[in-house]
Image (cartoon, grey):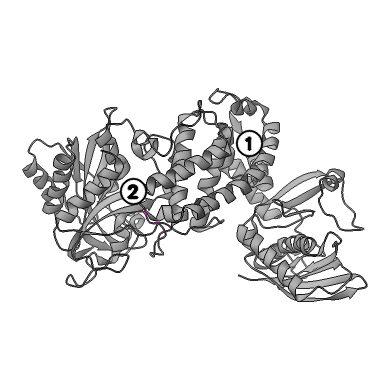
C-alpha cells in the first residue's frame, strides 16, 4: 500500500467506527503558547474535560464533531531541526489520530488500535509500553491498559516506562495530560520503532510540562471530570512497517517526490534537503512568510539550509526547483490546497533562493579563501579532510562570517561538513565574540560620555540608553535605504550632504535642484517599505578605501576616511562606506514614513522621516 491509500484507509476505518472526519488545522495555530502546530490534539485541547460533556464540540472549521473524531494533522516540531539528517528525525510530519471526548476510554481505544494495525494493515506488533506510575505526582501504575492488551493478545510483550516516555503533556503553559501506551514495530533493519501513541487524558495540570517533571512545583494535577482519548500515529513511521523499509526516507513519502537527481549526493545532505523542502512547502501553504522572527524565521532557516546543502553537493538551483515542484504535486494528491496555491508557493521559495544565493556566492568565495582545504568538497563530495589541522572552525571566523555575510552557525557548519564527517565550530568563542560585539559596539563606534549620560554620540547619531540605541540603529539603516531609494527615483545626481539622527527621527540632506513632488515622495516611501518587507540582509565587510570606492560604495563628499573602511551593503539595493551601527535585516526597520521635505540650502534638499513599530 502507498501512503495515500494508508491515509484513506485510516480515515475510512474510524469513520465506520463512529468518528467524524476532521480536516487538518493550519500549521500556524490559534494557541499562542506554541509557535507551530505540533500534534493533532491541539485544535481539540480545550475540549478535554474542561467543558460540559454534553456541549457540542466543533472542528477547526466550526462544524459539529460529536464525541469521537479522526484526523490526519499536518505537524511541525522545531526541536528536531538540528537532528534532521539521521534515519528518523523530521521537522514536518503527518500525525494520524483518533480522539474521544467522553465517548470511550482505554478499552475501546486499545481495541480499535489493535484491530486497525493487525487486521486492516496486517502488521505484527513487536511490543507495547504502559506507564509504570509516579508517586511524587500522585499517578498510579496503568494496570488497566496492561490488562486490556493482555486480554486482546495474551502473548503480547508489555514494558513499563516512566514519565519521560509514557506520560504525555501538558503542551504550552497548561493543559490536559495523562499516561500513554505506545505500540512498537520492527523495521527492515530489525530495530523496534515506536509508531502509535495512545494518550489517556485523565488529568489537568495548571503549569508547563517542565514544571511537572521538575518535581519541585507547588502546582497539583487535577482529575478531569470527563477523561478523553488522544492518539497519534506518525504516517512516516507506520509506512516503514507497511512498506518494510529500513528508515522513513525509503518510504514513498520521500522516494516519489524526492528522487536522487545527482550521483554523489551524500545521504545526510539528501535527507536534509528532502525534509526542509517538504516543510517549506507546507509552511508557505499555510500562510507563513519569510522573515527574521517566529515561524517566518523557521521558514527562512529551512530554505537557506536547503540552498547551502545543495551548494555543498553541487546540486544546481534548477534541480531544487524540480524537487520543490515534485513535493507540491505529490502531496497535493491528498492536500488539494497545495495545488491551488502552487504558483504562490513556488514563487516565495524562488524569491528567497535568488536573494540568498547572491549573499551565499560572495560569502562562499571568502570562506574558501579562509579555509582552502574545504574547496575540495565542492569538487569531490564525501572526501574526508581536516580544517586547519584541528578539525574546527574558530569562533572568531564564525562570527566574522555571521556579521559580514549573515551566515548562521547552521550555514557555516553545513558549508564545512564533508559527507558524514562533521567539522566543529568553536561555539563558545563565537558566543564570546558576539557578546563582546554587543557590549562594546554594534559597529565599533559607541562611546561612553560620563557627564551628560550619552551612550552614543558620533555627531550623526545620538542615543542616551540601550532603548534609544535600538531606535537610532533602525533609523540609521533607514537613512541608507533612503539615499538608495532617492537615487533610484530621482536619479544618480542625488548625493548625501549630511544627516542627523535621534531616537525620534532622521534628518537627511542631499543634492537635488528642485522640490521633490508628492508623487516622488510616495514612490520613495513605497520602495523603502518594499525592501523592508523583503527583509534583506545587511552585510558588512572591511576593505581599503580605494577598493570600496571602486566597488561602487557611496561616500560622503569632503569626508575624510581611514585607509581601511567598513562597507555596509543591503544586497543589491544599497552600498555605502559607513561606521555603523546597523540592523542585521531590513525587516527590523518595520515601517518608514517621510514627514517633511524642504529646502536646506541652494541645491540641497532636506528630508525628515520616522520609522514605526
State which tag comes first along the sequence, 2 or 1: 2
**Mark 2 falls on what kind of element?**
strand
Does the magenta-highlighted stretch encompass residue 225? no
Estimate how packed mark 1 is, as few (under 14), some (14 to 19) or many (20 or more) residues with alpha carbons within 10 Å: some
Does the magenta-highlighted stretch encompass residue 34? yes
Q: Is residue 218 visible?
A: no
What residue sits 86% from the left and 75% below the top?
Answer: 599
2 or 1: mark nearer the eye:
2
Location of residue 414 in the rendering, given as x and y in whole percent from the top left corner: 55, 36
What residue sits 20% from the left and 65% below the top?
Answer: 224
Image vertical order of residue 204 relative to residue 319, above or below: below
Count of labels in the image: 2
For residue 94, the mark is 2
Location of residue 4 in the rendering, given as x and y in whole percent from the top left corner: 30, 44
For residue 394, the mark is 1
Determine whether, in the image, residue 475 is placed left or right of residue 420: right
Which segment is the magenta one?
33-38
Q: Quadrant location of residue 118?
A: top left
The quadrant in which the N terminus is found is top left
Q: Is residue 129 visible?
A: yes
Image vertical order of residue 330 relative to residue 474, above or below: above
CB contact under 8 Å: marks 2 and 1: no
Amino acid at each position: 500500500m502507498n501512503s495515500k491509500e494508508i491515509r484513506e484507509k485510516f480515515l475510512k476505518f474510524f469513520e465506520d467506527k463512529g468518528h467524524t472526519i476532521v480536516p487538518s488545522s493550519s500549521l500556524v495555530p490559534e494557541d499562542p503558547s506554541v509557535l507551530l502546530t505540533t500534534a493533532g490534539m491541539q485544535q481539540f485541547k480545550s475540549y478535554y474535560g474542561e467543558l460540559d460533556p454534553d456541549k457540542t464540540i466543533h472542528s477547526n472549521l466550526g462544524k459539529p464533531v460529536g464525541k469521537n473524531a479522526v484526523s490526519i494533522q499536518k505537524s511541525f516540531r522545531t526541536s528536531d531541526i538540528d537532528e534532521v539528517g539521521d534515519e528518523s528525525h523530521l521537522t514536518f510530519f503527518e500525525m494520524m489520530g483518533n480522539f474521544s471526548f467522553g465517548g470511550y476510554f482505554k478499552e475501546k481505544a486499545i481495541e480499535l488500535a489493535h484491530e486497525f494495525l493487525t487486521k486492516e494493515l496486517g502488521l505484527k506488533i513487536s511490543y507495547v509500553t504502559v506507564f509504570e506510575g509516579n508517586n511524587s505526582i500522585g499517578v498510579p501504575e496503568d494496570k488497566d491498559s496492561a490488562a486490556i492488551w493482555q486480554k486482546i493478545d495474551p502473548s503480547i510483550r508489555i514494558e513499563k516506562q516512566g514519565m519521560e516516555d509514557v506520560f504525555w503533556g501538558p503542551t504550552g503553559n497548561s493543559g490536559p495530560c495523562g499516561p500513554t501506551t505506545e505500540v512498537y514495530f520492527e523495521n527492515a533493519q530489525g530495530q523496534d520503532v515506536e509508531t502509535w501513541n495512545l494518550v489517556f487524558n485523565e488529568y489537568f495540570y495548571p503549569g508547563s510540562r517542565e514544571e511537572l517533571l521538575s518535581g519541585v512545583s507547588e502546582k497539583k494535577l487535577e482529575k478531569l471530570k470527563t477523561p478523553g482519548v488522544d492518539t497519534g500515529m506518525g504516517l512516516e513511521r507506520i509506512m516503514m512497517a507497511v512498506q518494510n523499509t529500513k528508515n522513513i526516507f525509503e518510504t514513498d513519502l520521500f522516494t516519489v517526490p524526492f528522487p536522487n537527481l545527482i550521483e554523489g549526493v551524500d545521504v545526510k545532505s539528501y535527507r536534509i534537503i528532502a525534509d526542509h523542502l517538504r516543510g517549506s512547502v507546507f509552511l508557505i501553504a499555510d500562510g507563513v512568510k519569510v522573515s527574521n522572527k517566529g515561524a517566518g524565521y523557521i521558514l527562512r532557516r529551512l530554505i537557506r539550509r536547503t540552498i547551502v546543502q545543495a551548494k555543498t553537493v553541487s546540486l544546481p538551483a534548477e534541480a531544487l526547483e524540480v524537487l520543490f515542484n515534485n513535493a507540491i504535486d505529490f502531496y497535493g494528491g491528498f492536500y488539494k490546497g497545495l495545488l491551488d496555491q502552487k504558483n504562490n508557493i513556488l514563487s516565495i521559495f524562488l524569491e528567497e533562493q535568488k536573494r540568498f544565493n547572491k549573499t551565499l556566492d560572495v560569502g562562499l568565495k571568502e570562506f574558501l579563501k579562509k579555509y582552502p582545504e574545504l574547496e575540495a568538497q565542492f569538487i569531490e563530495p564525501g572526501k574526508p579532510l581536516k580544517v586547519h589541522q584541528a578539525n574546527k572552525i574558530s569562533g572568531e571566523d564564525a562570527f566574522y562570517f555571521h556579521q559580514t555575510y549573515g551566515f548562521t552557525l547552521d550555514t557555516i557548519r553545513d558549508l564545512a561538513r564533508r559527507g558524514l564527517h562533521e567539522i566543529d565550530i568553536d561555539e563558545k568563542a563565537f558566543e564570546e565574540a558576539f557578546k563582546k560585539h554587543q557590549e562594546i559596539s554594534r559597529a565599533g563606534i559607541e562611546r561612553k560620555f560620563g557627564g551628560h549620560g550619552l551612550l552614543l554620540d558620533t555627531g550623526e547619531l545620538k542615543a542616551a540608553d540601550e532603548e534609544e540605541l535600538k531606535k537610532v540603529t533602525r533609523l540609521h539603516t533607514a537613512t541608507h535605504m533612503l539615499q538608495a531609494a532617492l537615487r533610484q527615483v530621482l536619479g544618480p545626481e542625488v548625493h548625501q550632504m549630511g544627516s542627523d539622527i535621534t531616537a525620534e527621527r532622521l534628518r537627511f540632506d542631499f543634492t537635488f535642484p528642485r522640490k521633490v513632488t508628492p508623487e516622488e515622495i510616495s514612490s520613495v516611501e513605497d520602495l523603502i517599505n518594499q525592501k523592508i518587507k523583503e527583509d534583506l540582509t545587511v552585510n558588512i565587510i572591511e576593505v581599503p578605501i580605494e577598493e570600496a570606492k571602486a566597488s561602487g560604495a557611496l561616500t560622503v563628499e569632503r569626508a575624510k576616511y581611514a585607509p581601511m573602511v567598513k562597507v555596509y551593503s543591503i544586497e543589491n539595493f544599497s552600498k555605502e562606506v559607513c561606521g555603523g551601527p546597523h540592523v542585521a535585516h531590513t525587516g527590523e526597520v518595520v515601517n518608514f514614513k517621510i514627514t517633511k521635505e524642504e529646502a536646506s540650502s541652494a541645491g540641497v534638499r532636506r528630508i525628515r522621516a520616522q520609522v514605526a513599530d
